[in-house]
Image (cartoon, grey):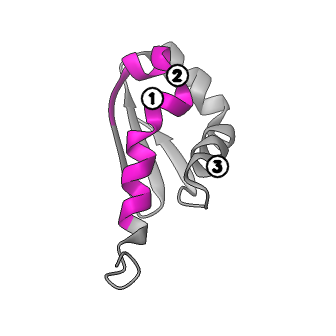
Amino acid sequence: MVKAYRLQGKLNEVTVVSSWERVMGKAVALKTKEVYVNQGRLFVRLTSAPLKHELLMAKSRVAELINSEVGETVINEVIFL
C-alpha cells in the first residue's frame, strides 16, 4: 500500500524526525526546539549556541547516523538554525 500511494519518502521523513531523540541522545533533544525535513535536508533549530557550533563540526556524522537509523539515504544535508 505504501508503494502504491508512493508514501515511502514521506514515511522516511517522519521516521527521521521521530528518531531524532533516540539517535542524538536526551541531552541534545532537550536543547532542540524544532526538527523538520524538506527536500532531503534536515533542519534543526537549537536553543544552545555552543551545541550548535559543536554539531556544525560533525554535520556529516549526524547525517550518517540519521540515515543508518532509517536504513536508506534520506538526508543529504543537515542545517542547524
**In the displayed structure image, the side of residue 3 where residue 57 appears, left or right:** right
Residues tagged 1 and 2 counted as in contact (Cβ below 8 A): yes
Q: Residue furthest front?
A: 1
Which residue shows up at 42% across the image and 22% down it?
29
Q: Amino acid at mark 2?
A: Gly
Residue 21 sits inside the magenta stretch: yes
Label 1 crowd (10 A; few <14 / some 14-19 / many >=20): some
Residue bearing the label numbered 2: 25
Residue bearing the label numbered 1: 21
Give how far apart the Cα atoms at labels 2 and 3 are.
15 Å
Residue 46: image x %, image y %?
39, 25
Q: Quadrant of the C terminus?
A: top left
Label 2 crowd (10 A; few <14 / some 14-19 / many >=20): few
Residue 72 sits inside the magenta stretch: no
**In the displayed structure image, the side of residue 60 where residue 53 appears, left or right:** left
**Residue 58 appears in which quarter of the rendering?**
top right
Give how far apart the Cα atoms at labels 3 and 1 are.
15 Å
Which residue shows up at 52% across the image and 14% down it?
50
- Residues in magenta, as a range: 10-34
Q: Quadrant of the N terminus?
A: bottom left
| SS under mark 1 | helix
Q: Does the magenta stretch mainly form a helix, a strand or a loop?
A: helix
Residue bearing the label numbered 3: 68
Q: Amino acid at mark 3?
A: Ser
| SS under mark 2 | loop
Rendered view: 80 above or below 10? above
